[in-house]
Image (spheres, rainbow, N blue to C red):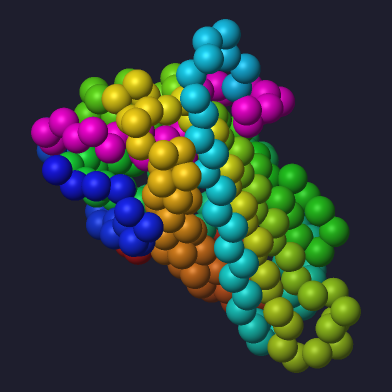
Amino acid sequence: MASLSSNPTILHFRNPRTPFRNSRRSPYIFVLSNLASSSDDSAKSPRRISADSSPKARFVARRTESVSVRQLQRPLIEYMSLPASQYSVLDAERIERIDDSTFRCYVYRFKFFAFEVCPVLLVRVEEQPNGCCIKLLSCKLEGSPIVVAQNDKFDASMENKISCDSTRGDSSVQKLTSDAVIEVNIEIPFAFRAIPTQAIESTGSQVLEQILKAMLPRFMSQLMKDYEAWASGDTSRQPLGTGEI
């Protein structure tokens, strides 16, 4: 039997549109809770109040990604000040617009132990000075029945703040930054209560860290390409992504 350890967990990403294969059961399904939320209520606290005394585990991951952007005919700060209604979805294969400021995102499908999982996020974009903040409203897991069954056993919160350095407004090159943090609180299944909580939390946090490590650079690359299209006069706001990692 595989064991939990402090070694980084390797995730294998797949296209989210590919059908799931049947997977044999694994005792480690609880760590899939890293991106899930049991409620669609955006005002709900990420820590769920439970009537029972089930032990809890907390996963946290944070990553900051910065890129240098060469300013074109139209300044980056003007692009970052666009209202959410004018945002491009960046990648139509993974993101769909619900309304002016709400989007549904299909996270990269990844294989974790014997399971393939595709988290589906509902997020809201809030406009801020020099950028915006993307906040998680709800999340559910798609996949095999045993994966879907975990959807009512954890809660998650996520914020990704995107901004440009307004102090360098006259510079030909500006810095674009994405600062993302994810927190997940789970009920530890009975079968795993003999495992130290610290080991469970370490494994879950490593999963979150690897997801951010894979997603943020690609997101920033798409954002730069969209800025270049917008700055050159393309007002179509057509998505430029292809769904590939």
Give x and y (percent) for residue 179.
65, 61
- Residue 128, relative to residue 230: is it above or below? above
Magenta stretch holds residue 25: yes
Q: Nearer the viewer, residue 108 or 7?
A: 7
Kindly give the residue lying farthest to the top in the view shown: 51
Give x and y (percent) for residue 186.
49, 30
Q: Nearer the viewer, residue 38 or 237?
A: 38
* Residue 181 showing in the rendered view: yes
Give x and y (percent) for residue 42.
66, 28
**Which residue sits at x=73%, y=54%?**
132
Magenta residues, dominant SS class:
loop
Stretch in magenta: 23-47
Quarter of the figure with the N terminus: top left
Q: Nearer the viewer, residue 100 or 160?
A: 160
- Residue 149, relative to residue 123: is it above or below? above
Q: How many marks?
A: 0
**Which residue sits at x=61%, y=38%?**
157
**Which residue sits at x=76%, y=60%?**
131
Query: To which quarter of the image does residue 100 belong?
Result: top right
Quarter of the figure with the C terminus: bottom left
Q: On the rendered structure, is 172 left or right of 93?
A: right
* Residue 80 showing in the rendered view: no
**Which residue sits at x=72%, y=88%?**
173
Give x and y (percent) for residue 153.
45, 22
Q: On the rendered structure, is 72 left or right of 51?
A: right
Magenta stretch holds residue 52: no
